[in-house]
Image (cartoon, grey):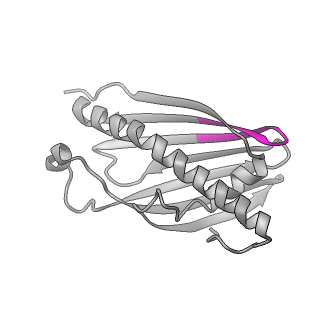
Amino acid sequence: MTSPRPRYFTDLSTLKKSWEEVTEAHWRKYPNPFSNHVLSEDVLDRYVKDGKLYTVRLIVKKQRIPDRLKIWVPSKYKACYVKETSVMDPDLQECTITSENLNGRSISTVIETLRYRGVKMCETIMERKTKFTAMFGRIQEAVYNKYVKNVDTTDKGMQCVLGLLEECQRQGITAALPNS
């Protein structure tokens, strides 16, 4: 039996915030009221090279497996470990973030790439491209559908953090949100 062909999700949206505000919100997006499944985040590596900031983070999330798929997933996968690699280029006002699951890859792999590009003083384009692969078509379809269903919640979390940062700035508060 062969694995199904990869499936893709793409999305493009405009955030009415500066590139600086959006990238700061990305680093501070956990916790937020829409991310209670995120257990922890840790910076594993961070360095500057050629004027670009490179970062690798480990994000640990609660594994939310649909009931009909639990038969395929070993019980040891109670948490999902996600490696997030980013490159931030302040000169070009671009930030590219790639996230991929580290465990359960023999069952399903999800690789998401977010690209934030500053286009105007108070406008940032967010481009999302996600690739899904799985050992069986039914698993791939379930993972894809769950992801698409959660995109709105993910975006609400980002909007929430952007709003909190704006409110903190308005009140002159500089250390109100957790920092990665």
**The magenta stretch spans residue 126:** yes
Q: Is residue 18 above or below residue 178?
A: above
Prevailing secondary structure of the magenta residues:
strand
Q: Is residue 80 above or below residue 105?
A: below
Query: To which quarter of the image does residue 53 belong?
Result: bottom right
Seen at 64% across and 70% down, the residue is: 177
Q: Is residue 122 above or below residue 41?
A: above
Q: Is residue 3 left or right of residue 9?
A: left
Seen at 46% across and 58% down, the residue is: 35
Residue 137 x/y as whole percent? 25, 29
Quick one: 94 or 162, which is closer to the camera?
162
Query: To which quarter of the image does residue 110 belong?
Result: top left
> Start and end of the magenta stretch?
114-127
Residue 140 x/y as whole percent? 30, 34
Quick one: 173 or 53, which is closer to the camera?
173
Seen at 36% across and 35% down, the residue is: 144
**Location of the C terminus (image quadrant):** bottom right
Residue 84 x/y as whole percent? 54, 54
Q: Is residue 65 left or right of residue 60?
A: left
Q: Is residue 98 left or right of residue 6?
A: right
